[in-house]
Image (cartoon, rainbow, N blue to C red):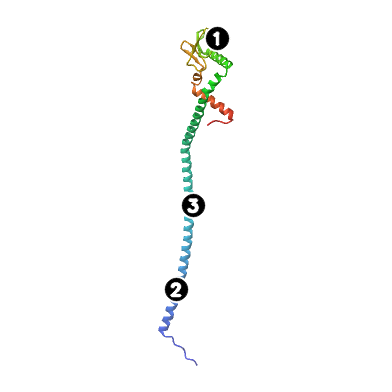
Amino acid sequence: MKARRTVTPEAHNEVSVRALEAHIRQEYEQRRAALLARAQSEAAWIVSAARRRAAALLRDARRRERRQAWAAIADERPRCQARLRRRRLAERRKWAEAGFRLLEPALADLWAAGPAVRAAWLGQALGDAARSLPAGSQWLIEYPAGEPPGRLREWLAGGAAGQRCEIEAHGSLPAGYRIRAGLALIDTTPAGLTARRNAIAGRLLAELERDTGQAVE
């Protein structure tokens, strides 16, 4: 018959302590795992929320930039249009000045083309005088000294019949005619014809646009 093994109190206490330590260790690991899982879940939510917030901030920043860009464009547009208008006006002035520089020599060349041209020139001047000078007034017709007075009187007999006229040669007139009635004056010399610069500039530019088929800017 075997003898029963006797467990001393010290051994019993050691076993109890080890069991308690194992239980504590298990509880610690379970809680640590639970806390870690919770922390990871919260971290993932924070990252997601931060990402959404960053995306919202980026969208707001882009909208602000677009608004600022459109505002800048709106502010700049009048200045750009003003600069474009100034450039176009400068171009038009340049073309008009170029036309003026060519116009007076062209009129002088036309005058020198022959008696038929000068007769037509006088006819135009007489028509302007008839429309503009006081009715019944006496006219003084000034003409270039190189024009034979007899030929001028022949033209007047055909173009100003019934009109009281005097003629007077002027050495200072290179071309064209001046017709006076008191203080009123019809000036068809090259200088007189080009005196209305703005109106002539508009006509010159219109002619150029018609010839080229596009607007002159």
Q: Secondary structure at mark 2?
A: helix
**Label 3 close to label 2 by CB (< 8 Å):** no
Mark 3 closeness class: few <14, some 14–19, many ≥20 residues within 10 Å: few
Q: Residue at x 49, y 33 (%)?
A: 87
Image depth: mark 1 or mark 2 in front? 1
Q: Amino acid at mark 1?
A: Gly
**As drawn, 205 above or below 137:** below
Instruction: Work out how far the residue at label 1 is from the one at label 2, CA to CA, in angstroms.
Output: 141 Å
Residue ID for mark 2:
25
Instruction: Work out how far the residue at label 1 is from the one at label 3, CA to CA, in angstroms.
Output: 98 Å
Q: Residue at x 45, y 76 (%)?
A: 22
**Which label belongs to residue 150?**
1
Query: Position of 129 compared to 11: left or right?
Result: right
Give x and y (percent) for residue 16: 43, 79
Instruction: Work out how far the residue at label 3 is from the one at label 2, CA to CA, in angstroms.
Output: 44 Å
Specify which label sits upstream in the sequence, 3 or 2: 2
Q: Residue at x 44, y 80 (%)?
A: 15
Residue sitting nearer the eye, 182 or 60: 182
Specify which label sits upstream in the sequence, 1 or 2: 2
Q: Amino acid at mark 2?
A: Arg
**Which label belongs to residue 12?**
none
